[in-house]
Image: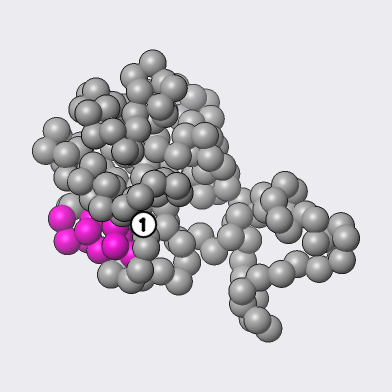
Amino acid sequence: MSMSGLVLVTGASGKTGGSLIAQLEQRGLPYRAASRRAAIPFDWEQSDTWDAALEDVASIYLVAPGTVKDAYGLMQDFIALAMRKGVRSFVFLSMAGLPAGGPAHGQVHQWLKDNSDDWSVLCPSAFMQNFSGSYNLATIREEDRIYSNTGAGRVPFIDVNDIAAAALALLT
């Protein structure tokens, strides 16, 4: 794989972002972890941190911030700035069942569709790692059950490393 410029990884401390960073490092590809505590700080709620975080960035892995007011509006403003600064490619982590134009993540999906020429949206259903550390682990151990919002239906659980590998292929 060859590329010029950095991959900016938002959600760098999360499951898929952390895996993406590990995969970029394994391949010797340049990246910047977007974080308030990074050498070049990035904060979704402080737009004055965005310019420096976007310096030399060619592509961005986008993860919606979970605890930010107007997260989707901020993301759209950030992506618009990134495009003006020459960022070419965007990969957005959304969710299964949330179409472009739908609620929440669907707003960013639609914005990318309407405004960018090089975008991808990943829509995994659930993380396989939820069995080993999250809410599923307790119910598996205590009740021998897995609960989901699918009723009698089935849902695939996807390994976060596979999600990150798909993002890496799209970003590079």
- Residue 124 seen: yes
Residue in front for this viewpoint, 4 or 76: 76
Label 1: which secondary element: strand
Q: Quadrant of residue 167?
A: top left
Q: Which residue is at a point 28% across and 47% down the rendered structure image?
A: 75
Query: Residue 102 location in percent, x, y?
Result: 33, 71
Give the vertical position of 14 relative to 24 (above or below).
below
Residue in front for this viewpoint, 30 or 81: 81
Count neighbours of disc 1 (C-alpha within 10 A) and say few if under 14, some if 14 to 19, many if 20 or more: many
Q: Residue furthest bottom?
A: 152
Q: Is residue 157 left or right of residue 69?
A: right
**Which secondary structure class fits the magenta region best?**
helix
Provide the residue designation for mark 1.
121
The amino acid type of the residue labelled 1 equals: Val
Q: Quadrant of residue 113?
A: bottom left
Residue 76 lies in the magenta stretch:
no
- Residue 118 seen: no
Q: Please state the extent of the stretch shown in magenta in the rendering.
A: 106-115
Residue 113 lies in the magenta stretch:
yes
Give the vertical position of 31 relative to 140 (above or below).
above
Q: Which residue is at a point 69% across and 51% down the rendered structure image?
A: 134
Q: Residue furthest top?
A: 39
Q: Could you tell me which quadrant the C terminus lies in?
A: top left
Q: Which residue is at a point 39% across and 35% down the rendered structure image?
A: 9
Q: Quadrant of residue 137?
A: bottom right
